[in-house]
Every structure is written in structure tokens, then in C-alpha cells.
Amino acid sequence: MKLPIALLFFSAAASSQDLGAPKFTPAGELQMPANYREWVFLSAGLGMTYDAAASASANPPFQNVFVSRPGYDGFLKTGLWPDNTTFILEIRASEAKGSINQNGRFQTGIAAIEAEVKQAGQWTFYAFGKEGKQGKPLARSERCYSCHAENGAVDNTFVQFYPTLLPTAKAKGTLRVTAEGH
């Protein structure tokens, strides 16, 4: 069965949107990718903090990291993130002793969603809050910019916490030694 040409173009355009190409509002806000949970899952952290003076929380949050498929594929080929790579950081509350669980922790509701997007070789961070449809770009003076620049193991990102990508960065020679030795 032959598909009409217009339908083929529409399908290709829809596929690129589904893969995670960033979309912006006229005001420069990042539109929430509706299907980010279908992207490549990189890692989950529990109670991660980047401040040594911060005290441990009784209810540490989970941080789930997803990356767009074109960004992931580009990284596997080169060890670097191509332009239009989009990361979603989904921060969820945690609980213990629910249902049959008596010892470990499990994820619950969304506490916040953040994104990091690479365009024209530059990374920008966006904050969506709990249920935002558009992420506001964070000011370049926010700590996330300097922290990622100083501690990111590859191209402004914390590949040192992504166990499935760390071997790729090492093999491609793109892993930068940070203060922590990764």
C-alpha cells in the first residue's frame, strides 16, 4: 500500500518531535516534551546532593534522568552530545514502608521537573516546576551552570553518574577528569 507523500512528510515530522527535538514558545520557554518518559533512561539517583554541607534528608528525593534519542545516539557515536540534545531531570519524592515494602525506598509524586538543552554548542537549563507545560530558562547566574561546567565529566553533563555511558566516554576519549577523579 502506498502512502500519500503528504502523509509521509507528516509522519517524519511527527517522528522527529517524538524523539525529543526541543520546541520553544515565542517567549523562549521550552515546551514540555509529552513523551519524555519514553526517551532513553540514563540513571536514577536517591538523595543526591552536590553540597557537602547539606544534611541528609529523612525523605531523600529520587532524580530520574532521561535523554532524547537523537542525543543518546549521537553520544554513542562520538562520545559528545550533539546540538538539540535534551535532558529531562524528573525529581520525585520518596517514601518507605508502603504496601509490602518494609525496608527500602520507592518513588512517589513529582516534586519538580527540569531540563538541560544544548543548542549551538551552548547548554541552557529550564525549570518546569511540578506540572509546568513550559520551562522557563534559568538565569546564567544560577549555580547549576557553574557546577556543570566545573564538574561535568563530558560536555557539561554528569556522565560520571550514568553507568551505561561511562564506558563510551572512556572509549571515545571524551571523559574529563573532575575534582572527584572521574
Image: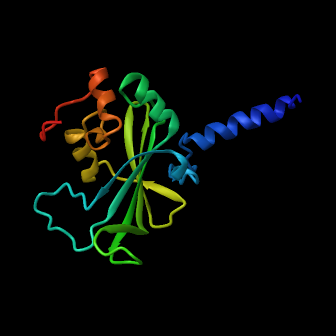
170 over 27 or under it: above or below: above
Tell whether 27 sits left or right of 67. right
Tell whether 15 sits left or right of 71. right
Q: Position of residue 41 (x, y in %)?
A: 44, 46
Looking at the picture, tell me which residue is in the foreground, 77 or 134.
77
Q: Position of residue 89 (x, y in %)?
A: 40, 53
Tell whether 124 sits left or right of 55. right
Please identify the quarter of the rendering in which residue 98 is found. Answer: bottom left
62 over 179 or under it: above or below: below
**Which residue is depicted at the point 13% across and 41% down?**
180
Q: How is the image coloured?
A: rainbow
136 over 156 or under it: above or below: below
* The C terminus lies in quadrant: top left
* The N terminus lies in quadrant: top right
Residue 141 appears in the rendering: no
**Which residue is depicted at the point 21% across and 30% down?**
176
Q: Position of residue 33 (x, y in %)?
A: 55, 51
Q: Position of residue 91 (x, y in %)?
A: 38, 61
Q: Give the mark count.
A: 0
**Which residue is depicted at the point 41% across and 29% down?**
75
Residue positioned most to the front: 100
25 over 164 or under it: above or below: below
Tell whether 3 sits left or right of 102. right
Residue 30 appears in the rendering: yes
